[in-house]
Image (spheres, coloured by chain):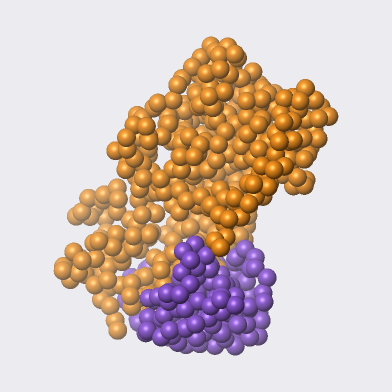
Amino acid sequence: MTVIPQKRKKGASVLKQSTYDHPFGIKPMGNSYFDSSNGIKECKSHGLSVFNVLPEQQLLELLIYLGPEAAAKLAQTSRAFYVYCYHDDLWRQFTIKRFNGDFEFIINWRNTFKSKYQKYIQDSPIKIQGFYSDLLYTAWRCVSVPLKDLCGVENDNIDRRSNMTLEAFIQEYMIPNKPVILTDVVQNWPAYKKWNFEYLLGTDFKFRAEAVDITFANYYKYMTQCKEEAPLYLFDKKCTFDEKMRNDFQIPDYFNQDLFSVLKEKRPDYRWLIVGPERSGSTFHIDPNSTNAWNAVIKGSKKWILYPPNHIPPGVYPSRDGSEVTSPVSLAEWFLNYYQDIQDDPIEQRPVEAVCKEGEILFVPNKWWHCVMNLEPGIALTQNFVGMENLESVLNFCKKKPEQVSGFCHGDLYEEFKKGLQQDMPQVWDKVKHLDQASAKETWNNLCMEKSFSFSF
Amino acid sequence: MASVKLTTSDDKEYTLDRELIFQSNLIKNMVTDLDVFDAPIPLPNVTSSTLDIVIKYLKIHKDDPPPPDKPIEKAVDDMIDEDKELMKLEFNIMADVILAANYLDIPGLLDIGCRTVAWHIKQCKDYHEIREKFNIPKELWRSEEEIAEMKKELNGILG
């Protein structure tokens, strides 16, 4: 069978390029009916041959197995394979697998991969007709839809406070376990003036971005060019302890309790520098080990959505024991699919949300669900901590859910934490030791409860 | 040993040991969550001939430890001989097996299915050969320049 070639439009085209036009001409499934009545034949079913039976997600996973060389060959067989084999997420995986952070990003991942082997020549995407895919089209939508339309930047219902006494902060926010934005902390840090992209470009750290170790020069090339649904997010713990950066910020009194410090070198990771382009961020999660957190925006701005403990956000499916969170969709897709819907929810079911701007710091109370979207390229600093107000919660969590303890690889966090408190802060331990004694029976009951939930008899 | 009943899309009923079929996460979760022991579970997109291959796989692997995280680009040589033998299939059947493994959530079978397909594609010297092997109809969709461009690009990657 031979398919007549489609003429591509060159130069000033007749149709105005819409923001939502996919560079390959991919359209949502719904268009196939309309197009077919106009004589455009769909090209997926014959183009994929026997593999047309597979769900698209599965097909993309199969293509990962091919590796770059075979994928590039397969791309030439048909329009349908061209589109899937050029899906840039595939090339992100190929590039990272082969080069880790040793790449200089050029336009997209496939070009980046190619540039490792040949002098860079920009190619233009081939626009095809008759290809319909909700999966690929949605991925493109998530990349191209303006964030201001997507994220409800005008919705802002978190208290903003300044000039608070420590006592007032504890009474009004820490004890009720309620989020608040403090507007007069970050400005006093040397980091507020000093940390920007130029400054980071001058550092010689290898930063950690997900599974990639990368210099800031290379990360910056990436973050200023990438157009991705879920950009690679720099989350580095080491640099915040380096003397060059450590003295550029002071932990404010409000957050200065740090009971995990009794764990000394065994303590779970707790402080990170966060850098990312617009559209980067974190999907819904609860912070580990029932810790509180603060997040200081040094450059850029972040949209936060928070749900109180036990209110599972729409579109999020935690496993029964709470150990795993699956958000089947990316951050952008969550906003696209669910955020618009919840605007109609009754007020008491609405999340707490705000745009945290440059120079502001957000208190994220323990056990709250939250997601964060960077509205512009940004730099932030975050730290998780345990204070008197969440100590009981942390101890209960570590004791009752040891399998869910995160970032600790030195045995039993509960026992180590207890030992540390007994040694270094006996007066603190005295206040909470009733939890230790009272709980033998309670723990057993809890175990039985959990058992009966996870296995149905 | 309790058993589980399944019905394929061509209406054949199977009765399988729980221990065997619980390698399918889908069936395992369904049975443990819903307590459906007696009613047969319909598998609308699995034919009996595909399920026969799946069952062969389950029998080969019934004593395996739980699978590790999914590897990427593993060589087909890492596969055990029984699996290689099992994967000697027509490509349309192989696609059905991958579909079934995906649907039934049997990661090990999905893995060897994908690896085998990838191996076959990697054996082909160019796209003409891939087309022939997988019966992909010839499409004229690229201009001469685009063909040349993609060829150059590929040669660059191949080094």
For the point 62% across and 63% down, the residue is B69
Residue farthest along the right direction in this orientation: A423
Q: Position of residue A11 (x, y in %)?
A: 26, 55
Q: Position of residue A431 (x, y in %)?
A: 72, 25
Q: Quadrant of the C terminus of chain A?
A: bottom right
Direction from residue A60 to residue A244 in the image, left or right: right
Q: Is residue A65 visible?
A: no
For the point 61% across and 66% down, the residue is B71
Colour of chain B as rendered? purple
Colour of chain A as rendered? orange
Q: Nearer the viewer, residue B150 or A287?
A: A287
Q: Position of residue A366 (x, y in %)?
A: 57, 33
- Measured along the vertical axis of the image, is residue B134 above or below residue A305? below
Question: Which image quadrant is residue B56 in?
Answer: bottom right
Q: Nearer the viewer, residue B99 or A38?
A: B99
For the point 48% across and 66% down, the residue is B35
- Measured along the vertical axis of the image, is residue B31 above or below residue B127? above
For the point 46% across and 69% down, the residue is B36
Direction from residue B82 to residue A129 in the image, left or right: left
Residue farthest along the left direction in this orientation: A37
Question: Which image quadrant is residue A49 in?
Answer: bottom left
Q: Is residue A90 visible?
A: yes
Q: Position of residue A243 (x, y in %)?
A: 74, 28
Q: Nearer the viewer, residue B118 or A82?
A: B118
